[in-house]
Image (cartoon, rainbow, N blue to C red):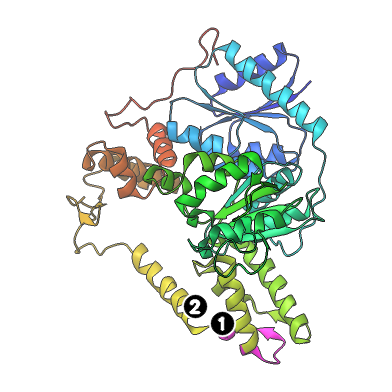
């Protein structure tokens, strides 16, 4: 018997799903908001979550990362009142089991529930907790915990791994961690820097050569592919591999056999392939810069590493780790940190990610000399200047215009559109009423008026509306549904009816 949690603000949907769980002999609970749902999930013991997208306190899709980061996280089935292809993409990327459109037939809902429960039971039976060797890997954010789960899964497999992420996110470190936790841990981990391969020596470097194969080949040479026999071959910056080599390497991946330059016999190598790149290989395939058949071979297990700016809570543990290393290297006592030191670091966007952070920390460490505490004054001036400028710009961008100044206007591709007159109580009667009510009532009036104006000024073009408002597609659609608005006029964006016979 499974324990099912329904998170939906529609009482009729909650009651229908609770009835369905009882009919299928499962235990069921229901709440009407994200906050209540997360509070219940933190208590544990939930197997399946039916999660609505549009809820009073936010978008259900935004809660996915927190749900999936929970210990023994449940399987999630998304419920939505209107079809949204981008929302479905976000949901699947977030690890949901299924994406159902309301009203959904009872039979389809039960089938999704039973399949999810069966999958969960099988996962529990085969996947116990895994103790990973995580030397030099630091992170406690939800984004990093997802990556750690991916490392655990990849370590127990033999398939090819493709690690993607911006420069400096630690792609090679993660590849080494997977190797260190795999059955091949005692065998070689061989790195091939694809960006450094030259057209003339690439085959000799990878596949080796026999003495006399070409001018300068004074002796036999074992290539990197053979050196990885029994271990792991890591293709760093695989997106830089020349097209002519991609075809030759594809055969090596398929057969695990190759011919050294100048040799008459083929050689075998039993290696596991891992690759890394900071480039968009799918886009390169479309542009003809990367072979699609090679991409399919190297992307069996994809792992995407988040940039440092998306996991700022990891800056403090990274600082403690790196400064501890430096203290040990220089033979100095451990140094502490002033709180403003972290405040400055968290205000910087870190285009170079962890690699740049570690470089900045070393500069601050050297600047601090014998001091026992690191202060923001020890950080490089260019970092402090950029953070100071960013903090000074922020209030200016948030400031409201003076009443006598030019009226507010929507921006589209940098060009001002027809201005929108600021609201006043004479022209907005409902605002006059709301002024005598709660702050929430005032905000609601302004929010609805803003959305109505946004749709009118953009002609109902959702792309233009997203660019003008700065909202994501899912957030914009959620607000339009909340206020019963759509590009075609009020009412069209309302949720589908629920509770018809034979549907959820």
Residue 114's disc number: none
Quarter assignment of residue 488: top left
| Residue span colored magenta | 367-379
Residue 478 appears at what percent x and percent y?
43, 36
Mark 2 secondary-structure assignment: helix
Note whether 379 is above or below 395 in the view shown.
below
Q: Nearer the viewer, residue 124 or 210?
A: 210
Residue 60 visible within the image? no
Mark 1 secondary-structure assignment: loop
- Residue that mark 1 sits on: 379
Residue 269 appears at what percent x and percent y?
71, 48
User: In the visual, does 390 lie left or right of 308?
Assistant: left
Residue 383's disc number: 2
> Residue sitting at 50 percent across and 17 percent down?
103
Quarter assignment of residue 480: top left
Quarter assignment of residue 216: bottom right
Whether tag 1 and tag 2 are in contact, CB under 8 A, the answer is yes
Furthest residue toward top: 501
> Residue sitting at 58 percent across and 40 percent down?
297
């Amino acid at each position: 018997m499974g324990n099912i949690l329904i998170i939906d603000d529609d009482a009729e949907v909650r009651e229908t799903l609770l009835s369905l769980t009882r009919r299928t002999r499962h235990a069921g609970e229901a709440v009407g908001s994200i906050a209540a749902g997360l509070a219940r999930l933190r208590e544990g013991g939930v197997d399946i979550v039916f999660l609505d997208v549009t809820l009073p306190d936010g978008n259900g899709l935004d809660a996915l990362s927190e749900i999936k980061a929970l210990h023994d996280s449940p399987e999630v089935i998304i419920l939505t009142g209107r079809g949204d292809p981008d929302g479905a993409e976000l949901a699947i990327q977030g690890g949901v089991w299924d994406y159902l459109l309301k009203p959904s037939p009872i039979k389809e809902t039960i089938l999704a529930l039973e399949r999810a429960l069966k999958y969960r039971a099988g996962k529990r039976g085969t996947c116990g907790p895994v103790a990973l060797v995580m030397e030099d890997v630091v992170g406690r954010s939800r984004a990093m915990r997802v990556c750690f789960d991916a490392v655990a899964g990849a370590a127990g497999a033999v398939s090819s791994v493709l690690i993607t992420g911006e420069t400096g996110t630690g792609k090679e470190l993660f590849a080494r961690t997977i190797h260190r936790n795999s059955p091949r841990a005692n065998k070689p981990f061989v790195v091939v820097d694809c960006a450094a391969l030259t057209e003339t020596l690439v085959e000799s470097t990878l596949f080796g050569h026999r003495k006399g194969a070409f001018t300068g080949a004074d002796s036999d040479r074992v290539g990197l592919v053979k050196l990885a026999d029994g271990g792991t071959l890591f293709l760093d910056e695989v997106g830089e591999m020349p097209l002519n080599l991609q075809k030759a390497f594809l055969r090596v991946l398929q057969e695990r056999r190759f011919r050294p330059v100048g040799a008459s016999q083929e050689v075998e190598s039993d290696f596991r392939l891992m690759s890394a790149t900071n480039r968009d290989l799918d886009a390169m395939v479309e542009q003809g810069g990367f072979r699609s058949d090679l991409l399919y071979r190297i992307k069996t297990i994809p792992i995407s590493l988040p940039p440092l700016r998306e996991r700022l809570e990891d800056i403090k543990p990274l600082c403690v780790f790196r400064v501890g290393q430096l203290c040990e290297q220089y033979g100095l006592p451990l140094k502490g940190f002033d709180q403003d030191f972290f405040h400055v670091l968290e205000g910087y966007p870190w285009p170079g990610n962890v690699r740049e952070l570690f470089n900045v920390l070393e500069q601050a460490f050297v600047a601090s000399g014998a001091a026992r505490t690191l202060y923001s004054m020890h950080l490089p001036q260019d970092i402090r200047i950029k953070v100071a400028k960013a903090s000074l710009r922020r209030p200016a961008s948030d400031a409201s215009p003076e009443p006598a100044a030019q009226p507010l206007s929507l921006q589209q591709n940098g060009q001002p559109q027809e201005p929108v007159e600021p609201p006043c109580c004479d022209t907005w009667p409902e605002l006059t009423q709301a002024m005598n009510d709660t702050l929430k009532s005032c905000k609601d009036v302004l929010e609805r008026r803003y959305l109505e104006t946004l749709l009118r000024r953009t002609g109902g073009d959702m792309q233009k509306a997203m660019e003008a408002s700065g909202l994501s597609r899912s957030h914009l659609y959620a607000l339009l549904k909340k206020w019963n608005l759509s590009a075609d006029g009020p009412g069209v964006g309302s949720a589908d009816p629920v509770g018809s016979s034979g549907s959820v």
